Amino acid sequence: MYNCFGDTMCSSIKINPEDVKSLKEKFNVPFDIPTDTIKPNEKALVLYKEGKILPKLMSFGWNDKVFIINARQETLLEKPIFKKGKRCVIPASLFHEWSYAKEKVTFHSDNIMYLSGLYKQDNEFLIITTKSNDSVRRTHDRMPIILEHSQLEDWFNDTKFISLLRQEPKELEHEQKLEQLSLF
């Protein structure tokens, strides 16, 4: 079990069926892309680079001494645990966040969002977070670092990625469910 409140950003992600075709074509994805909501411990499409950008299904969360789903941008380069990771991106049509009142809030954009992340060789990934912008702040103080498609090559570049860690997050649209929903 892990803590979803306090300092962590507890989210789930989803790729809408209408975005699957675009992702399959752009990244030559040879397998089915999950379109159900993906929560920690479930498999999601992850893009990583080995010569070229490649797709793979990986599990959301690192099983280390503790279960980790996020890495804070501010300490990413300092903490030894994250030095094992390699940069990746997690395509998403939307992500869910739980408000302080435990209400489910959905954040989305007009385009596919590429959430910055780290992965380990055992096919586990986590999402890198930063301080929230105005569109997310009322719900949570953290949010994923969101990249544009045009920024992917820079994200995988060993020197250029640092500036992307510090970029101002783009504004997002959101919808809120008023009923209490299960966190898991």
Image: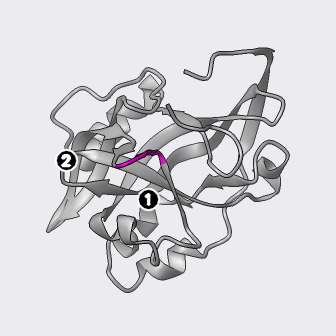
Q: Which residue is mark 1?
A: 149
Find the residue positioned furthest to the bottom: 159
Q: Position of residue 3 (x, y in %)?
A: 60, 38
Q: Which residue is mark 2?
A: 122
Q: Could you tell me the amino acid type at mark 1?
A: His
Q: Is residue 72 left or right of residue 158?
A: right
- Which residue is rendered at x = 53% and y = 33% of the image? 12
Q: Is residue 158 left or right of residue 108?
A: left
Q: Which SS does the magenta portion mostly show? A: loop
The span shown in magenta is: 65-69
**Mark 2 surroundings: few (<14), some (14-19) or many (≥20) residues within 10 A:** few
- In the rendered view of the protein, which quadrant contains the C terminus? top right
Q: CA distance from mark 2 to mark 1?
A: 26 Å
Q: Is residue 68 magenta?
A: yes
- Which residue is rendered at x = 33% and y = 49% of the image? 64
Looking at the picture, tell me which residue is in the foreground, 67 or 48. 67
Q: Does dot 2 land on a helix, a strand or a loop?
A: loop
**Mark 1 surroundings: few (<14), some (14-19) or many (≥20) residues within 10 A:** few
Q: Which mark is on residue 57?
A: none
Mark before the other along the chain sequence, 2 or 1: 2
Q: Does dot 1 land on a helix, a strand or a loop?
A: helix
